[in-house]
Image (cartoon, rainbow, N blue to C red):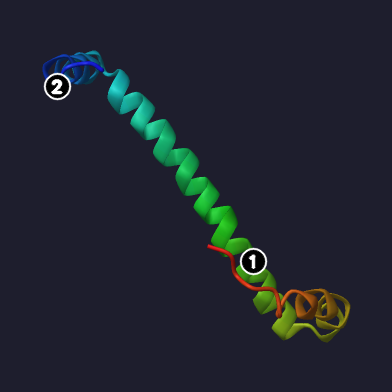
Amino acid sequence: MPTLSSVIGAWIGLLDGGELLYHAGASLMRGGSADLVGRHRPARFGVLMAWSKPIRTVFNPIVEIFYPMPNRR
């Protein structure tokens, strides 16, 4: 197990070199895009189902199948 001082020294070294900010930005970009895909696409699809009867007729049975499934967390 590394000592706290060596961890802090490595962190400062990464911060000074710019690596920490570069990799933090890349991680935030990946997380943000995953959030966009995971939240906004299903919401838009739900609105589309509400507005369009043909789309609702096709996809509503699939949505109804998953209603009784318990949420495992």
- Residue 59 % position (x, y): 83, 75
User: On the image, which quarter does residue 3 sit in?
Assistant: top left
State left or right for residue 73 relative to residue 23.
Answer: right
Quadrant location of the N terminus in the rendered image: top left
Q: Residue at x 22, y 16 (%)?
A: 2
Q: Residue at x 58, y 57 (%)?
A: 38
Q: Is residue 30 above or below residue 60?
A: above
State left or right for residue 72 relative to residue 32.
Answer: right
Q: Is residue 53 above or below residue 26?
A: below
In this view, the residue in front, 57 or 6, is 6
Q: Residue at x 74, y 79 (%)?
A: 49
In this view, the residue in front, 61 or 44, is 61
- Residue 13 % position (x, y): 20, 13
User: On the image, which quarter does residue 19 sit in?
Assistant: top left
Residue identifier under label 1: 42
View extreme (left): residue: 5
The amino acid marked with disc number 2 is: Leu
State left or right for residue 39 relative to residue 50.
Answer: left
Q: Is residue 44 above or below residue 26?
A: below
User: On the image, which quarter does residue 51 sit in?
Assistant: bottom right
Disc number at residue 4? 2
The amino acid marked with disc number 1 is: Pro
- Going from N to C along the chain, the mark reached first, 2 or 1, is 2
Q: Is residue 45 above or below residue 22?
A: below
Circle 2 — which element? helix
